[in-house]
Image (cartoon, coloured by chain):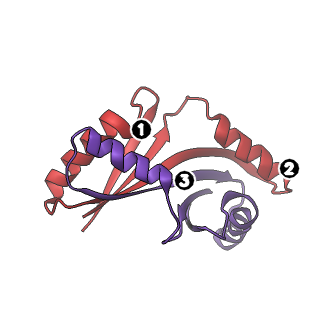
Chain colours: A purple, B red
């Protein structure tokens, strides 16, 4: 089973990396870019076959390692 | 209009960051992790209202700045 995890900064948390991308895009001549946010995208290949168990495991992974829950949100999608 | 861009390493390209996450997860006691790949997730807020035009613009952004197309793939999703 494959888990797809998105880790994004919470609203209100400054995102200098996203800001830098936005400035670079404007510098390259792309007009009308009003905001850029950058996050992480992680694909995890799991041996687990049960979707509920897999989700619980990945949830725990996010809380302990993948996301800093003080400033980041995470979203988990499972592929069979 | 909001564009969501996923930038991922192509198959066969070494992913030391994903490897490090996999090792860390195993070290933390998560069994059955057979592979981890890490990519980037970028949200871009555009003033453009036309979906086709927005997609063309973001496609160009990916090719010129967001992705290194020699080793990375990108995927664009548009939210109205």
Vertical position of residue A57 compared to residue B15: above or below: below
Measured as percent of width and height from the top left, residue A36 is found at 38, 56
Which residue is tagged 1?
Answer: B73
Q: Which mark is residue A15?
A: none
Going by the image, does A3 lie left or right of A27? right
Dot in front, 3 or 1: 3
Residue identified by numbered label 3: A40
Nearer to the camera, B34 or A21:
A21
Which of the marked residues, 1 or 2, is nearer the chain's N terminus? 2
Residue at mark 3: chain: A
Badge 2 and badge 3 in a common chain: no
Q: Separation of disc 3 and disc 1 at Cα?
A: 15 Å
* Count of marks overlaid on the render: 3
Residue B27 badge: 2
Disc 3 on helix, strand or loop? strand
For residue A51, which quarter of the picture? bottom right
């Amino acid at each position: 089973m494959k888990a797809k995890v998105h880790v994004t900064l919470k609203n209100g948390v400054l995102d200098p990396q996203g800001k830098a991308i936005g400035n670079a895009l404007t510098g390259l001549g792309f007009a009308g870019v009003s905001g850029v946010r950058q996050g992480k995208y992680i694909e995890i290949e799991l041996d687990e076959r049960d979707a509920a168990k897999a989700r619980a495991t990945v949830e725990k992974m996010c809380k302990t390692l993948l996301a800093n829950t003080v400033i980041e949100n995470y979203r988990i999608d499972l592929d069979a």
